[in-house]
């Protein structure tokens, strides 16, 4: 039996922005992040909305959780856009896309200089999410 990791007070220092066009996935991630101790979670249903949210961050430690398959602007285009903006926070790719697609997106993110803390398939286990939060705090 696996026991979920408890919330960690240091996670309250993070601003987490989640971009996913699936409303159910947004709520699941929000609940998981709050359970882990994150207090500032911003949910975005579109990549353009998430770009505006990222632009408004005050420079605090940030983690951006990004889906790949989204309308209007897919995850790869979104990663290019945040790289252009010189987003200093961490990025976690979380997608139901095939492993080769996730891997290609990860290689692209790294090539653009994005601080990638992980690439995972949906749904994401709470302990792996905690690992990504910890990596984002480490910078």
Image: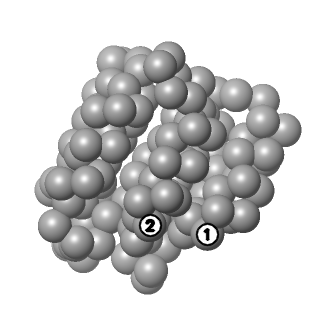
**Circle 1 Cα neighbour tier, 10 Å, few/some/many (<14 / 14–19 / ≥20):** some
Foreground residue among 98 and 51: 51
Residue 128 in which image quadrant: bottom right
**Label 2 neighbourhood size at 10 Å, few (<14), some (14-19), many (20+)?**
few
Q: Identify whether 128 is placed above or below 95.
A: below
Position above or below: 26 against 50: above
Identify the secondary structure beneath mark 2. loop
Give how far apart the Cα atoms at labels 1 and 2 are. 9 Å
Residue 98 in the image, given as x and y percentages of width and height: 78, 29
Q: Residue at x 79, y 46 (%)?
A: 104
In-image side of 88 versus 38 (left or right): right
With respect to residue 95, does 60 lie above or below? below
Q: Which mark is residue 86?
A: 2
- Whether residue 129 is visible to the viewer of this picture, yes or no, is no
Q: Which residue matches tag 1?
A: 113
Residue at point 71% right, 46% down?
105
Residue that sits furthest to the bottom in the current view: 138
User: Along the horizontal axis of the image, is 23 left or right of 121?
Assistant: left
């Amino acid at each position: 039996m696996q026991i979920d990791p408890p919330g960690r007070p240091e996670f309250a220092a993070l601003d987490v922005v989640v971009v996913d066009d699936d409303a159910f996935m947004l709520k699941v991630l929000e609940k998981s992040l709050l359970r882990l101790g994150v207090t500032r979670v911003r949910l975005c249903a579109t990549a353009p909305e998430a770009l505006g949210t990222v632009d408004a961050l005050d420079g605090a430690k940030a983690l951006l959780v990004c889906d790949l398959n989204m309308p209007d602007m897919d995850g790869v285009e979104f990663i290019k856009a945040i790289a252009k903006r010189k987003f200093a926070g961490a990025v976690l790719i979380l997608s139901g896309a095939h492993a080769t697609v996730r891997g290609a997106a990860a290689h692209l993110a790294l090539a653009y200089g994005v601080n990638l803390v992980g690439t995972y398939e949906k749904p994401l286990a709470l302990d792996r999410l905690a690992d990504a939060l910890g990596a984002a705090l480490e910078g």
